[in-house]
Image: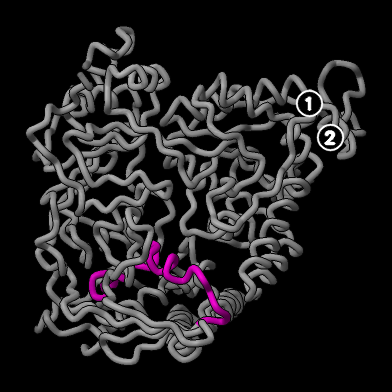
Amino acid sequence: MIRQLPLILLLPALLVLVVWFDEPAPRSDFTWSSSSDVFTLDPQRMSYLTDMRVGSALYEGLVRFDPEQGLFVPGAATSWERSADGRSWTFHLRPDARWSDGSPVTAWDFAWSWMRLLTPDTAASYSSLFFPIRGARECWKHRNEQLKAFSERDFLDDRERIVAARRLWDDHEDRFSREVGIEVVDESTLVVHLEQPLPWLLDLLAFTPASPVYRPSVEGWPTADDPDQPWHRRDIPEWDDRAFVKIDPASGRLFQDHRWARPGRLVGNGPYLLDSWRYKRDLRLVASPTWHDADGVACETITKRTIEDPNTAVLAFESGALDWLNGVNVDYRVDMIEQQDLGHRNDIHVVPAFATDFFSFNCRPTLPGGRLNPFADPAVRRAFALTVDRDSIVEHVTRLNEPIATTLVPPGSIPGYESPRGLDRDPDRARSELAAAGWIDRDGDGLVESEDGSLFPITTLLYTTNTPRFKRMAIALREQWETELGVRIELVGKGSKFYRNDLREGDFMIARGTWYGDYGDPTTFLDLCRTGDGNNSRGFTDPMIDAALDEASTESDPSRRLKMLADVERRLFTESLPMVPICQVVDVHMFDPDRISGLSSHPRQIHQFWKVAVDDGGARGAAAP
């Protein structure tokens, strides 16, 4: 099927493919690819879908979400029950749960791992999702206050500083164990106490960041005399004897060296082990003999390849190098879909996703370097949102005719939730909003100026270069904004790693974004707009929005609660506009259904790799007859 590639793209893609295969790794039972590499294998720090897909193979939380049944099924826990008031959940761990080094998985592993997740020092993106656990928010706040006070103290010398910093950490650990509602009853029983009932708690506990990690591995403890002994029964090594953690005497924070999450060091409790990882090349998993259902693993080996160039990725699939291409981003994918509709192929799969494409505004008062930020004004953000022609983008730019989105939660994706309507295209109102913010074309040159005659700052629009989709969307938005608003837009394309860093540092004015919902509740999207949320890269803050989200979290009536959240979303996308939604994501994948089974078509894109099976009787990459 290589002949289906446009000839002008074939030779460059072949050259890249040859270079890419210059050091071939062992052939795995199942090989898949995505355009970006894994960012981290520390589950508490994961925030990207690719990371979580690999993470779900290396680790196992208390429960798992089964996309085929739409139910939560046992993971590391075999059973659980909820108290009558819904504020306490008791989980019973399976007796045969083992870490990959053979030691038992216990309730202490979850308690310690969740302390990592709920400690500011870890810099986890999803910590705030778990603040409904009793005392978690207060303990987090106290730790931050401790660190702030520490940074303002004067010390006689470095030794006094180190002693004080370690004492602060000991105080934090003690406070967490006493005040946060994570109760270890015994090695196989864990109780979670909540501030108020949380209908989607199981969804959170099935989320990869809630997976356990093995403390001796994460901290780099010396080898144990008895490896079968649970770590909580051993003496905790002194700080100098822990290879991967230390207390930073300058800031007082716990510094964590993430080399523990590398081949040969990573200890997991999931169905697979990390065999190798070559950055921006490939990552290989092998079945874990210690997993409780090791006999049920269909593929003994799995390789995840990173192929940034979309044409090379398609060529790799069609040449037989890949079994599953996760994300078809070539310019001609619409043509490939049309071929499938005509019955000329059967390996293209279009899946509406629990996700939204949007462009974020940097909402901070100033930009890096201290420059004033015009997008700190919601009127400016509304002006840019009101100019967007979404219909044109999905029809002529993406050409997939995705459902357009004026709000963030995909309509109809959550039972009982009625999505509000955001701002539709209205260029006249857009110019009025911009004028209300003080930006008017005062000299008739087609560009807007402030009262002192200063031109509206050149606006940088950041996008990722790993797919032409976002560049084309950025080009279309530049044309719409420059034409209708009289502003100047500069496109900035960067690779995924540098793009992520710019988002984290707030070094952008407008940036492309995509968000996949993590659990079946509107807050999985709306919490992106909470002050201080780990995924609020926009720096958006609104005390009234925060208060409304807090109020909804305490509402016990499910129907009323969803209406409250819908009102929050209405206010966000008709008044505040921290981002401008574009469309619901439609994922396009490639795999041969005659060869590959076990991949899910669920919108939440949760794949259980240990259930994937490959039938080598089929012809790899063959088209339908």
Q: How is the image coloured?
A: one colour
Quadrant holding the C terminus? top left
Q: Disc 2 and disc 1: Cα gap in Å?
A: 8 Å
The residue shown at (43%, 35%) is 495
Q: Up-down: is 327 above or below 540? A: above
Residue 163 shows in this picture:
no
Q: Is residue 202 magenta?
A: yes
| Corner quadrant of residue 384 | top right
**Chain part drawn in magenta:** 194-219
Q: Is residue 48 magenta?
A: no
Find residue 509 and report its horizontal and vertical position in percent: 65, 39
Amino acid type, label 1: Leu
Q: Up-down: is 97 above or below 564? A: below
Mark 1 surroundings: few (<14), some (14-19) or many (≥20) residues within 10 A: many
The residue shown at (23%, 17%) is 14
| Pointer 2 residue | 434
